[in-house]
Amino acid sequence: MLFNTSQVGLSAYMGLLAYEMAGGIVGNFHLDKSFTYLSFILVFFVTNVSLVSFYMTLRNESQLLENIARLLHKQSVLIYFTFVSFGILMTIVLQAEGLGGVILLSIILLFLSITYRHYYEMYDHFRFLSIKDELTGLYNHRYFQEKLNEMVAKGETVSLLLLDLDYFKIYNDMYGHPQGDKLLQEISKELVKEIPEHGVVCRYGGEEFAVLLPGTESEEALAIAESIRTRIAGHSFYGMEHMPKKRITVSVGVSTYPRMATSKENLIMLADEALYKVKYTSRNKVQLYSSLVDELKSHFQFGQAETELIQMIKTFLMIINSKDRYTFGHTERDMEYAEALARKIGLPEEEIKFIRYGALLHDIGKVEVPTEILNKKTRLTDEEWEIMKMHVIWGEEIVKPIRELAPCLPIIRHHHERYDGKGYPDGLAGTDIPLAARILTVVDSFDAMTTNRPYQKTKTIPEAIEELRRCSGTQFDPELVEPFIEVIKELRTVQMEQGA
């Protein structure tokens, strides 16, 4: 109330000074002095907007220019000039009323002050609704986008954490949406406790949250993300005893601008890819985005032409990711499995290196497969299947010009051959199939069996192991099946020890 009355009085005083400087005379209303009245109105308006904007800036984190822009919105301007018109009309009516008119004018100013107070309250309310999530009280998705835009536009370092609650759909289905909402509110409170003062916590959507950490490099961001994961995993929530692992956990993807990303959109995409990798592998884990193609570059000394081709491959992988996120995540899992199996059977490091990158690139030819075939939710027709089978040929052609990656070509071309000779594209059998391709055939099939796909029922790990043994000697090299089963058991043991 005090501020409202004071700023109205100060605005009126500044308007009066402008009025007198323009030649206006205090007293009766004169229609021929319209310019002086216009001076008063404009100066009053500018002073009023400036004072209110400054006041709003002190009360919240919005920038001064942002608040000015909101007050200059057409609805605000319309309200102001409606009151001004009302004031002028009352002045004309009251100009001959003497002391009674002054008293009445004071009462009008008081009511104007009260009206402004309600206007500020309404402004604060709608401002809150425009930038805050009503359920959790965190900043909303719109504010997240605006704030990230500001940070990237300034070119400052900023790390982004994308968080997703694990098994939240199960919790919602089990206890209902009201209890699910309560869980989101509790998670929000726990989340805020681990964020430094300069951080911005937002509800990204559904059970996803986003944290902006300006001036924070990846190492510090990872530490903050890990503290969030630990706090949530260790907190007690209603009904957690009936959840998988008997707790509520969170998966976190981390990326940093400009060290990793080139734009706001790219930063979000990289954090999302890191999060997606966690969700498809272990959950309850923090994952920093890592570019496998950039890692590939670090292992080889490419010339200018090869560097451009590597960049093209990176672009192709991004296109595959946008067309079919399963394929992109699938290649990374295959790479991990293939490397582990190659080490298990004692291959030298040089061969393991090319097996890693062959696994990364083995499905790159799918960039040429039409999206409607790649993402089809039912079984492919014979014609569609023939197109899909061409991805091994197209992949080989894409990578062939990069001579440093020549050892990867047999993996790309032959990873769908079968040990009994009934595979494609060349119908090779037994040891005629390159060893690296035979390794990838085993791991590729295992990942396909244990990953959720629309056109097939997902197998459990024991079921997939049984299938590997059943097809040993027909689809798979019998010398590789048992070593790979050992690899699976070892990897699962490590994940269980890490609490995944």
Image (cartoon, rainbow, N blue to C red):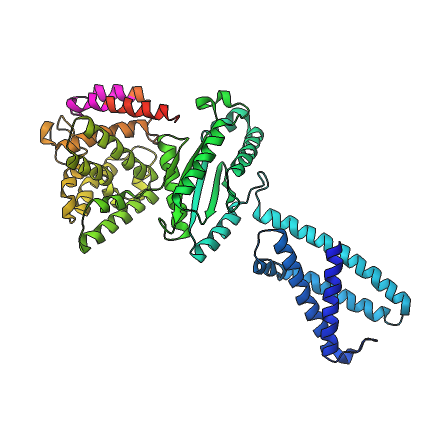
In the rendered image of this protein, does residue 98 appear above or below residue 275? Answer: below
Quadrant in the picture for residue 36: bottom right
**Rendering coords of residue 87 (x, y %):** 78, 66
What is the residue that sits farthest to the left in this orientation?
A: 432
What is the x, y in percent for residue 300?
Answer: 19, 46
Res. 134 image quadrant: top right
Q: Is residue 109 visible?
A: yes
User: What range is drawn magenta here?
Assistant: 464-484
Q: Residue at x 66, y 62 (%)?
A: 49
280 sits left or right of 20 in the view: left
Q: Quadrant of the C terminus?
A: top left
At x 37% / y 37%, what residue is drawn?
Answer: 287
- Magenta: main secondary structure equals helix
Residue 42 sits above or below residue 268 on the image: below
**Residue under the point 18% across and 21% down:** 472
- Magenta-drawn stretch contains 468: yes
Q: Is residue 58 left or right of residue 20?
A: left
Quick check: can you spot residue 474? no
Which quarter of the figure has residue 391? top left
Q: Position of residue 190 (x, y in %)?
A: 53, 34
- Horizontally, residue 108 falls left or right of residue 206, namely right
Residue 197, x across and y down, in percent:
53, 45
